Each structure stands twice: as structure tokens, then as C-alpha cells.
Image (tube, helix red, strand yellow):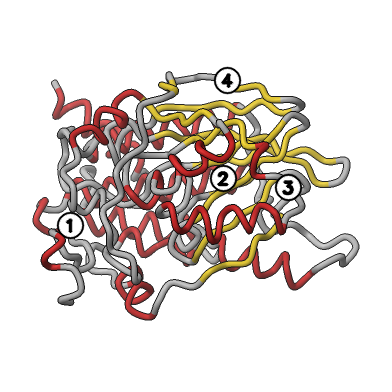
Amino acid sequence: MRKHWLMAPLALACLGACTKGVPTVEDEVAEATRLAGEDFAESLFICDPKSTKIADMLAEGVEQLGPTWAFDNLAFLGNSFVGVWVLNTSDGLILFDAGIGEADARDNIVPGIKKLGLDPEDIRYVFVTHGHWDHYGGAAYLKQISGAQIGLGEADWELMARLEPGSLARAPYFGDDLADRPPPERDLVVADGTKIKLGDSEVTLLITPGHSPGTLSALIPVRQGDKTHVMSLLGGTAFPRSLEPTGFMGGLRQFEASVERLRQISQEAGADGTINTHPFVDGTTRKLGEIAAAGEEAGAANPFVLGSDKVSRYYSMFLSCLRAAALRPMGAIELPPMPSSPEEKGKE
């Protein structure tokens, strides 16, 4: 039954692109390329298992990105690899992800929040998209200074409890500080569909397993002048190396189901933009640069506002790439060279 369940959406997804009924890897990549067009061309690296985009970026060195307001109430701060989205509400701050470690939270995230004109002590929630060091690293420090609640899905709280000290999920593979990152203590367990209302804002949290067993995604309301928008945040990007769930991954089949569900929910919610805490994935770095360059220019278009049709097309592109990955031998899913233990750090 599972085989038939998988093949039906694959065949439907490739209508117009496949010529022999059952899609091939090449069919799915071609469909992803068509869906990407010029709008999402910079995201197509996710379709290429041999892409060196991430490895090249890490080899060249991660750069700090200045804190930037993407909307009147939503700002990004962090580095070119991973960062934090800050939602400013009338009753405090909600953070999505927490920086890569205590030093990053102390020396970059907190000063960045102050540069935005906000008070770090007003952080009420830190929602961590998944249980890897580059997303939870600064959470315990942020809780210490603000008393904020740290929220993850149940499965990723359990994932963090199983992580071995020094493993890739707990310890960096770039930068000067390669120390192990102990996960934060268990706090708020987020259920699928949870709505968090804080002041004048209400965010919707969704459990979207795939990249990790309990990846957390979100729909985030934002404002620009007298206009309101909804940003759709996919909480995990890198493709797992398995079709089925493991203790450390949600698996490609669950990832596909999660992204399709997020696409549908985003469409129903009227989401007209996407964001990601990895700014290189969906053009966040470029978009922030465009906003900074426009400054106070009257009437400047916000590059994060895509329209609901393009949001749906972005996720459809992502789905075609996932289907291509599921059709490849699992050994073909490659990641950048990374040290796997503390002793190997710095050798590459």
C-alpha cells in the first residue's frame, strides 16, 4: 500500500512534464526548474545532490548580517549561514531560532536586538525550528536573560535528549568556537496547529517532520504601513538521507507530505511570502540587501512579498526536488564534507 501511496502524488505532480507516466529524477528536476523560473532560481541548489553552495559558503567564511527590518514588525539578524527572525508585538518579542551558541546570542543576537530599538528582556518566546546546534545554540542564554519560554515539537525535544556530545547536531563545523553545544532544558512542548497570541499578533505553529523528526514551521503575521501580510516559514531545509523516519530524521516521504501540507495551509491562510532562518536558501540575504539599499524610499516594493501564487509555486518547486531525491539511490544524497567528531574538527 505504501508504494502505491507514494507513486500517486508523484505521477500527479509531474503532469505536463513527464512523458512516460511514472516520473524520473530528470523529470522532477526539469519540473522544479520550470517552477523556479527566475523567481526562485537561487533556490534550485536543493535539487542538486552534488551542489557545493553550502560548502563553498562555509569555506569562504560566514559573514555577520546587520540587523534589518524586513517589515514594520519583523526583523532578521544573524549571519549568512543561519539567523533569527524577531517578531515585535505590543506585548513583547517572539524569536524564531536562537543563534548558533551562547557567544553568538550574547555578542550578536542581543546587541542586534538593541540596535533594532528593542529590549532583549522583552523576549517572551523562542521557537526553535528543530533540534540542531545552529538553531537552538543560544536558546538557554536568551532564556536566562529574559525568562522566555523555549518551544520545540515533542519529537525534537526527544531528539536533542539523544544527541551525543560532539556530534554534528550538537557541535559546529565552522568558525573559531567549535565547542559542544548542550541543548536547552526541556520547556514548552509545541503541538501541531498551536496558535500563540501575544499582544497584537497571533502566530500559527505547525509540526512538519522531514528534516528532523519534529521540525517546527510557522505562519507569521506581519505589517508594512497599513498593509498586512502572512509569511510562511519552513523550519527545515536539508534533505534527510532516508526515505522513512529514523531517530534523527523525519525521512523524505514525511518531508514531502509536510511540505505539501504547509503549501496548502499557507494558501488557505493567504500567505504571500516565505522566509527561512537559513538566509541563503530562499534569497533572504539578497532581499535584506535590497531593503537596506532602498532605505526610506517611498513606495519601494518589499521583496519578501511574493503573492500567494508564487508562494504555492515555491513550495511546488521544493516538492519536485524532494521527489527527485526520493527517486535517487540513498547513497546519492551528499552533504558538504564535515567533521564527525571533536577530534576531527579543523582537519578539513
- Horizontal placement of 281 versus 306: left or right? left
Which quadrant of the figure has residue 293? bottom right
What whole-number distance in Å separates the C-alpha atoms at marks 3 and 4? 24 Å
Amino acid type, residue under disc 3 in the picture: Leu
Say which residue label 4 marks.
195
Say which residue label 1 marks.
333
The mark closer to the camera, 1 or 3, is 3
Mark 3 / mark 4, whichever is N-terminal: 3
Q: Are marks 3 and 4 in contact (CB under 8 Å)?
A: no
Residue 311 is tagged as: 2
The mark closer to the camera, 2 or 4, is 4
Residue 139 x, y percent position in the rendering:
45, 41
Q: Quadrant of the C terminus?
A: bottom left
Which quadrant of the figure has residue 114? bottom right
Amino acid type, residue under disc 4 in the picture: Lys
Between 276 and 312, the one nearer to me in the picture: 276
Tell me which residue sits at (39%, 48%) in the image.
137
Tell me which residue sits at (26%, 53%) in the image.
180
User: Mark 2 falls on what kind of element?
Assistant: helix
Between 254 and 314, the one nearer to me in the picture: 254
User: Mark 4 falls on what kind of element?
Assistant: strand
Say which residue label 3 marks.
118
Residue 86 x, y percent position in the rendering:
62, 45
Amino acid type, residue under disc 1 in the picture: Ile
- Horizontal placement of 342 versus 78: left or right? left
Label 2 crowd bin: few (<14), some (14–19), many (20+), radius 10 Å: many
